[in-house]
Image (cartoon, rainbow, N blue to C red):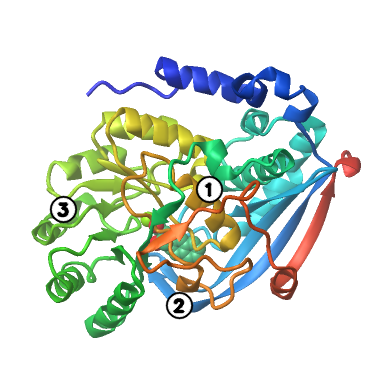
Amino acid sequence: MAVRPPGRPRRAARRRRAGDRVLQSGLVRGAQTETRQEAVVKLTGFELIRVAMPLVAPFRTSFGVEHERDVLMVRAVTPDAHGWGECVAMSEPLYSSEYVDGAADVIRRFLAPRLLAAGELHPHQVCDLLEPMKGHRMAKAALETAVLDAWLRERGESFGAHLGAVRDRVPAGVSVGIMDTIPRLLDAVDGYLAQGYLRIKLKIEPGWDVEPVRAVRERFGDELLLQVDANAAYTLADAATLARLDAFDLLLIEQPLAEDDLRQHAELARLVRTPICLDESIVSAKVAADAIALRATRVINIKPGRVGGYLEARRIHDLCQAHGIPVWCGGMLETGIGRAANVALAALPGFSLPGDTSASDRYYAQDITEPFVLGPDGHVEVPSGPGIGIEPVADVLRARTTSSQWLGAGDLGS
Ligand code: NPQ
Ligand code: MG
C-alpha cells in the first residue's frame, strides 16, 4: 500500500491546509466579508483552572483504578470573548508520559508565554508557534482548543462547522472497566445496553480477556458491536492468547502492545484475525502515516488531546479517509467541555464507528456543563452554538474548582 506522508498531502488536502495557515476564513468565505483584523484573536491572557470531578464509580483499566478525575481547564480570554480547552492529561503518567501537574507547568512556563507574546494570532498558527517546544501534546491541545473556541465564538461559527462536521448527532459507545467478577461485568453491560449504547468496549488485561469476552458474547448475542482495549498491557509473547479472541467476532483489539511497538503491532497483526486499532501509539499524523504504511493498524482511535489538538486530529481523519482506514473518537473521561468538542469532531464523515462519546452520566453525577444525554436511539447531539457551543455552569465550576491561576499578556517577562 502506498502511503502518502502527512507532509505531502493530496492536492485537495494541500489546498485546505495551505488555507489553514492564516486567514483561512477570508480566503474560504470571500475576503470581502472579513477584514484581516477579524481573522485573528488578541489574547488578553489565559486562566488555568483545576477541577476535581468525582466519578460515579471507580474506573479500572490495565494501568490502574481511577476514583476522581483531576482536570486542568484552560480559559483563553480576548477583549470580546473567551474560549475553553480541557486538558486530557491524567494526574499520573499511566496512560502516556503526560500528567496534569506537568501540563500545567509547561503551559505556565513555556507555552502560554509564547502565545501571549505573539499578540494577535489566528488559531491555526498556535501549532507552529508551539512547535519548537518538544512533546507535551495534551498541554498544547488544551491551549489550541481554548484559542480556537474563543476565535469561533467571536465569529459565531460552531466547532463542528469549522472542522467539517456532516452530522448533527453521533452514535455513542461506552467503555466498560475491568470488574471483580464476570457476573458484575454482565450486569454493567446489561445496564449500558438498556440505556441505549450502540457499542460496548471491554477493558482487558492478562487474566481478564478471553473469559469476559466469551461471557459477554454468549449473553448478549452475535449482533452486539463489541471491541476490547488493552491499554498496552500485552507483549508479542501473548499473541496466542490474543488470537483466541478471534473466535468472538470483535470489531477490533485496541492498543494491545506498548506505545512505541509499531513494528511489533504489525507483527501481531499477522498472527491475529481481529483488526488491530491503535490508540496510545498514534501521537501525530506522521506516526499515523507510518502505522498505516507498516500495516500496524487497520482502524485508528483519534483522541485530539493525545495528538496535540483538533486540527491535527482532523489531519489524521483526512489521512485515514484517503487510505480507507475507519476512525472513531476516543475519550479521556472528559467533562462536558471536552466532550462537546469531541462530539463535534466525531461528526466528520470518516468517523464510521461509534466512539467513546458517552453521555455525561457515564462518568459524572453532575457534569460541569449542562449534561450530554443519550437519546433513545443511542446518539448524542452535536452542539450547534458558537465555538464548542456550551459553557460551564458557574456554580458547579466554582464548587469543583481546587485552584486557579491567571496568566496575563501584561505579566510577561516577570
Ligand atoms: C482509552 N479511555 O481509550 C481510555 C483511557 C483512559 C474511555 O476507555 C482518567 C483519565 C482515567 C483518563 C481511564 C476510555 C482514564 C483516562 C482510561 C483514560 O484508552
Ligand atoms: Mg484506548
- What amino acid is found at the position of numbered circle 2 in the picture? Pro
Q: Is residue 361 above or below residue 261?
A: below
The mark lying in front, picked from 2 and 3, is 2
Where does residue 172 sit, x and y in percent of width and height?
38, 60
What numbered label is drawn on residue 41? none
* Quadrant of residue 379 within the rendered picture: bottom left
Question: Label 1 near label 2: C-beta < 8 Å?
Answer: no
Instruction: Quote the CA–CA distance across marks 2 and 3.
Output: 30 Å
Tell me the CA gap for discs 2 and 1.
Answer: 22 Å
Real-space Cα distance between discs 3 and 1? 30 Å
Marked residue nearer the N-terminal end (3 or 1):
3
Q: Which residue is mark 2?
A: 58
Does any atom of ligand 1 lie closer than 8 Å to the CB of label 2?
no
Instruction: Answer above or below: position of 286 versus 157.
Output: above
Residue 139: percent from the left, percent from the top? 62, 47
For residue 265, above or below residue 360: above
Neighbor class of circle 3 (other Cα within 10 Å; few <14, some 14-19, many 20+) is: some
* Mark 2 burial class by Cα count in 10 Å: few <14, some 14-19, many 20+: some
**Quadrant in which residue 122 is drawn:** top right
The quarter of the picture where the N terminus appears is top left
- Quadrant position of residue 356: bottom left
Q: Amino acid at mark 3?
A: Ala
- From the image, tell me which residue sits under label 1: 305
